[in-house]
Amino acid sequence: MAKLVYVRIFDTTLRDGEQTPGVSLTPEEKMEVAIHLDKLGVDAIEAGFPSSSKGEEKALKDLAKAGLKAEICALTRTLKSDIDVAIACEVNSIHTFISTSDVQMKYALNMTPDQVLKAVEGSVQYIKDHGFLCEFSPMDATRTELGFLKKVCTVAEEAGTDRINVPDTVGIASPTSMRELIKELCST
């Protein structure tokens, strides 16, 4: 008999969808979409980036108190100030991210690989110390040097992250190359 595998649905419509030009949802519209996602059986709703605005913060607070079955998740950078805003929203989980490719670390973050590793460890530990589920993403993972990507994921795992998300930030991976990358990361 084949082993049953549960596929967990992590929906980013309320966060990523708002990056579409001309799209900006009110807290009421976010609630309406979240209710429908919950009815569909989505496991987790990444509801927004609460440190980006007071409206976004309000929307996450409202969703966290709505009594939905779906896990409500807030997105943060690996900054304590971002994480503190997410904590105040009383969501179920916090998804923190940092760029890990050479080009992003150098030009977007102006950080060294060691500084990135320290930020990953500190942010994951901070989230876990506050009692939240933690999801970590190495942003631009598909352009990150494999050895460093493994190191970043190991640091996040050792710091206590509950989940690791491996994003193809710039859309360069094929399904086959992504499968191989995940297989390689899981083998360490």
Image (cartoon, rainbow, N blue to C red):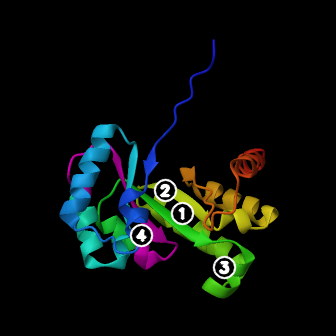
Quadrant housing residue 91: bottom left
71 left or right, relative to 66: right
Q: Mark 1 points at which residue?
A: 124
Q: Nearer the observer, disc 2 or disc 3?
A: 3
Say whether marks 2 and 1 touch (CB < 8 Å): yes
**Farthest-out residue, front:** 22
Quadrant housing residue 81: bottom left
* Percent x, y of residue 6: 52, 31
Q: Name the residue under label 4.
A: 20
Q: Which amino acid does label 4 sit on?
A: Thr
Q: Residue at x 38, y 72 (%)?
A: 84
Q: Distance between the residues labelled 4 and 1?
A: 29 Å
Magenta residues (range)? 63-82
Q: Mark 2 points at which residue?
A: 134
Q: Which residue is drawn at 42% across and 70% down?
A: 19
**What is the secondary structure assignment of the residue under circle 3?**
helix
Q: Is residue 150 on the magenta stretch?
A: no
